[in-house]
Amino acid sequence: MEQQQNQQFSDRIIKQINTSFDFKRLLGTLLSNWYWFVLFVSVTLTAGFLYLRYTTPIYQINSSLLIDENKDDAAQSVLSKLDPDNDKSQVNLFNEKVILQSHDLIYKVVDSLDLNIRFWALGRVKETEIYQECPIKIVFDTAGFKGGFLQLTVKQSTDGQFEITQNNVTEKVLYDTWVRKDYGHFKIVYNNGPGVNFGYLKSTEFIVKMENIDYAVERISGSFAVTLNDGRTSLLDLAYTDNISARGIDFMNALIYFYRKNELENINLKAEKTRRFLKEKQATMKNDMKVMDSAQVDIQQQNEILDPKAQASEFLTAKTEGEGLMNELIAEKEAVAALKANTLTNRRNQIIAGVSIKDANLLLLVGEYNQLIQKREQTARNSGPENPLLKEIDNEIYAKKVRIADACDKILDQLDMSLANAAKNVTELESKVKNTPTVERDLREANRGYEVIQSTFLILYQKEIENEISVNAATNKSKIVVVPRSSGAPISPVPRSIYGMMFLLGILIPGGFLVTREILNNKVINDHDIESLTNIPIVGTISRIESATNRENTIVVGPHIRTGVAEQFRLIRANLEFMASASNNRTFMITSSSSGEGKSFISINLGITMTLAKKRVVIMEFDLRKPKISQYLGLSNEGGISGYLAGMGGLETVLKASGIHENLYIANCGPVPPNPGELLVLPKTKQLFDELQEMFDIIIIDTAPIGLVSDALILSQYAGLNLFVVRQSYTVKDQVRMFDVLHKDGKIHNPGIIFNGVEFLKKYGYGYGGTGYGYSYGYGYGYGYYEDMSPATRNKKRGGLLGFFTK
């Protein structure tokens, strides 16, 4: 909704502009004042030429550096193989930009080229700054210029002698001689470089401007810029502006030189610091690792454990084996003890069986004992119990028992010793097993950080290799892609731009003035202005006539006059006849917005035009405040309308012969009354019109201006047509609106407008036209301004582009 309202408002504004402003007329005005454009363009182009002649040109010096992001660095190649994540080849272009624009770097350039000391050669019109062609230069000692800003005038008086002027104080100094001043120690030397113009020394004074280096750095930094390229490449574009291109190129070359030199110096400095740091760290780490190694050896020696994790399982296995051995020894001891007990308590002399004894001697004795038992049993079966051989065998058996018992005692003693040793071993192994975690913990504590130090030591070793390779293979990471070069033409001022701007200014100044004058103009200029203000028809147009102050100048219509103005009045007559054809009231009131718009002039000539059509016409001089018709026609002012309305005379005192045509009469004003408004509302006013309508075919009422007094509104009720005179470049547009409002309010009926005093595009004439009630008239007889011209000149004036804008 809001957008629709805004669109309607815009359409309304555009429509108002199109209806209230005549662009065709504006174009005609601009073309008719062509000489102003020529004048101003000439002046501005001349000013542009002088500006270019005496303005110091500015040149731009450009260069490009490629910062190699993937530089072939041997050290980096080694580290990239050892540690793929260790990639430091990427370059931050913003850091390089900051370095190039840094104060320290530009300071070195300014100091090396002495850019804080500048020379000007005095000329007849202006001072010209010189650089390479300057035949002298001022050299300061190592302390440099100590002041802030200083200006000197230097002139060679004789060969090898110079005059230095400072603050109107002149001092003579010799060539290559040190001069001591508060602002520093300096000397003047001759410049023997290429391009030096020694002709300056003969007649030229030099202005030397010196400034503190820091001030010069700030000044130059404002003219130097570094920009990053499109982002796809690591290219830096360098740009510097200077009014001397050679100095700008020297500045750029020196800047790049110091920048690349700083790169190598930084590499060497970094390498030396890195080398010293690595050596210190490596020595510290070696000592730390030695201390850790000694602590580990002490723990291992004290606990007789070299590898706790591996030996712990060995200790457990040995303990298990020891415990198994103890069990075997105990079982064997029990078996031997049982054998001994059975042997000694066995009175029945039975065979000993199921003996699990490992001792071979005891087993042999048991075997012999069993054989004796078998022998006795066999002997007893064969010879009887009383056989003496049995007794002998029993003695042997007894002896074997004793020997078996002695053997068991010996074996038991050996088993006790073995069992004690096995128990001791198991106890020792058990202690070692229990002590293994403690040893492992102690070793771990002693070894804590060893691997970190060891890996760090290896990294430092790699860094040492990288550092040494970097020093030996150091190259600049920057490459000069575009060497410093100056623009062939100055970037400021640009002649084409200056001339174009001056030409445009030469067009805009008079054009702006004319356009402003047209925009601010509140006067009616042509019929388009009238048509944009009101719908009241334009009855006709009257060309401009020289001031009508007497009879000869006032009358422009006659039976034998065929001028353009006369034809315009005849056209108005035709339009009025057409407009009045619908009613029998042939009374025409003529008024205007103010005095001087030509209503009396139109009334007289319109009356004459009507008489030429065989009509009896009376012109009523109803401007009772400022009558002019009688004055123009040289008539007597006696009697008149004011006397008639005041009852001081009859109709015969009102009417007077015009002396122009037998059918034209004048009802003069008479003496100017003190109360014209009261006279007009008297009944005698209507009586006067009734009597005159019976005597004349046409009545023309010349009234006071409707924009000033109410007389015209009172008289308009007696008129069949009410004509409003609009004078070109005189009538205010608001007055036309006022007349339109009166018509719309019903206070004025049957209105019409006569456009008077038209002189559009003065010396090209005016193609006039009128519009009335749906009919359009356009006559161009060529009278008036053309009638005194030759045919060739007349055709030239009528033709061409300007003729198109005559309406």
Image (cartoon, rainbow, N blue to C red):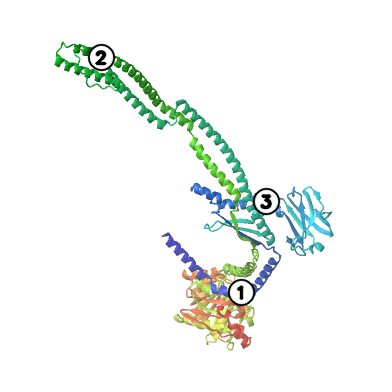
User: Which label sits in the foreground, 3 or 1?
Assistant: 3
The amino acid type of the residue labelled 3 equals Tyr
Circle number at residue 428? none
Q: Which mark is residue 671?
A: 1
Which image quarter holds the N terminus?
bottom left
Question: Going 65% across and 55% down the picture, which residue do you hit?
Answer: 257
Place of residue 234 in the rendered image (x, y in percent of width and height, measured from the top left) = 55, 56
How far apart, in angstroms, are the residues tagged by discs 1 and 2? 200 Å
Q: Residues within 10 Å of mark 1 (few under 14, many from 20)?
A: some
Task: Specify the amino acid type for callout 1.
Answer: Pro
Q: Quadrant of the C terminus?
A: bottom right
**Mark 2: which amino acid?**
Lys
Q: Nearer the viewer, residue 490 or 539?
A: 490
Observer-nearest residue: 80 or 506? 80
Measure the C-alpha gap from mark 3 to mark 1: 98 Å
The residue indicated by pointer 3 is 107
Give the mark nearer the N terminus: 1 vs 2: 2
